[in-house]
Image (cartoon, rainbow, N blue to C red):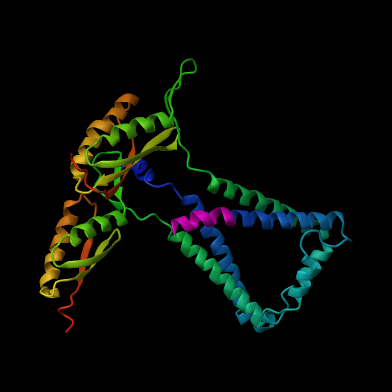
Amino acid sequence: MSSRSQAAVVRSAGTDRALAILLGLLILAGGAAVLLVGAGAFGTARAGRPLVDPIAAGWVAANRLPALGIAIAAGLLLLVLGLAWTARSVRPEAKPDVVLDRSPATGLTVTSGALSDAVAADAGTVEGVDRVRVRLVGDPDHPALRLTLWLRQGADLRTVWDELDSRVLARAREALAVSTLPAAVRIELNAAPRQRVA
Amino acid sequence: MLVLLRLLAPLLGLAVAATGALLAVEASWTLVRPRSGPLLVPWPAWRDTLASYSWSDSAVLVAGGVLALIGLLLVLVAGRARRQVVRMTDPAAEVTVVTSPRSLARLVGQRVRDEDGVDAASVTATARRVRVRVRAISRLTTEAALRPALTSLVTDLVTTLPLARTPRVQVVVDSPKDRR
């Protein structure tokens, strides 16, 4: 079991999930606090006070400059964080190139598109495969393959797998001169009717 | 859920950014021009309205409840946002093979519908369980006859697939012969 190939199955949503949960917890805590104060959990006297507490308002009026400074700083921080989050989540998934030779003089890189096309062409010739989609995922230091195969009705999964591994993936590994190439294979079973042999 | 999260995330980010921008702009404006009114949003009017409420007012309690609910929903949606995949046994090191619950359901459904005596079948599959709901056509077939046959058929089918975890199979048969 490899975590790199596992991670390549689906684009990671970890950051979005963590930030959304954090925001959700903050809002939940805020709402719960309002409910608790209003229901008298901190004393009925406090529950009767106005929302804009006169003591707090008085402090702000007395310390205008620091209060406004804090507000500006907080506002800028939220602005930056919010924009960073949006930019990150809107960015399409990276398609890293595979760098085979990092020496400054020569340097050899296989572009993501070239490798994907080559593997896809190979995989399409496997018997039982109707359609293939291949892309590279991950980062330039740790690229991984993600293949999606649509199989025909009646295709034997094990034969498809054997051919895929012994021919397609082995060729890719050979071409890149690596011993292992993390790969995530998504299989759609029974996606196309049986091929009629004329 | 995952799609929902991916759609929500940039919107939430923009909402946070907009709140921060408004806060920074209004605070700067008040600092620079304390005597003229607010610039973008009528926040002094908002502040005065809020000051007229107390914590124990029903409107405030309702607002607090709504906020708590929104926060909870967000946590639940984000927490449950995962792509459903059905793992297959790893055929080699550094290779992970998966399929989707929908394709598993499609496979089972086609096979079940090919059986004699089956008029229609609907299959739902999750990573843990394959549930088949079959409507039998034949007047001669009762549930007692068809169900074990179908269950063993689907179980065999599902076992021949190299799934990492064999899902539990559940077959329900509605037969007109039983409704008498």
Residue displayed at 69% across by 55% down: B20
Give the number of callouts: 0
Classify residue B150 by image quadrant: bottom left
Per the rendered image, the range of residues in magenta is B1-12
**Vertical order, B106 against B43 (above or below):** above
Seen in the picture, residue A119 relative to B136 is either above or below; the reply is: above
What x and y, as percent, mark residue B75?
Answer: 50, 63
Residue B113 belongs to the span the image colors magenta: no
**Residue B113, how many percent across, how many down?**
20, 62
The residue positioned 36% from the left and 45% from the top of the image is: A9
Q: Is residue A42 visible?
A: no
Instruction: Give coordinates of residue A33: x percent, y percent.
Output: 60, 72
Q: Tell me the chief SS of the magenta region.
A: helix
Rendered image quadrant of residue A129: top left
Q: Is residue A41 visible?
A: yes
Whether residue B7 appears in magenta in the rendering, the answer is yes
Q: Quadrant of the C terminus of chain A?
A: top left
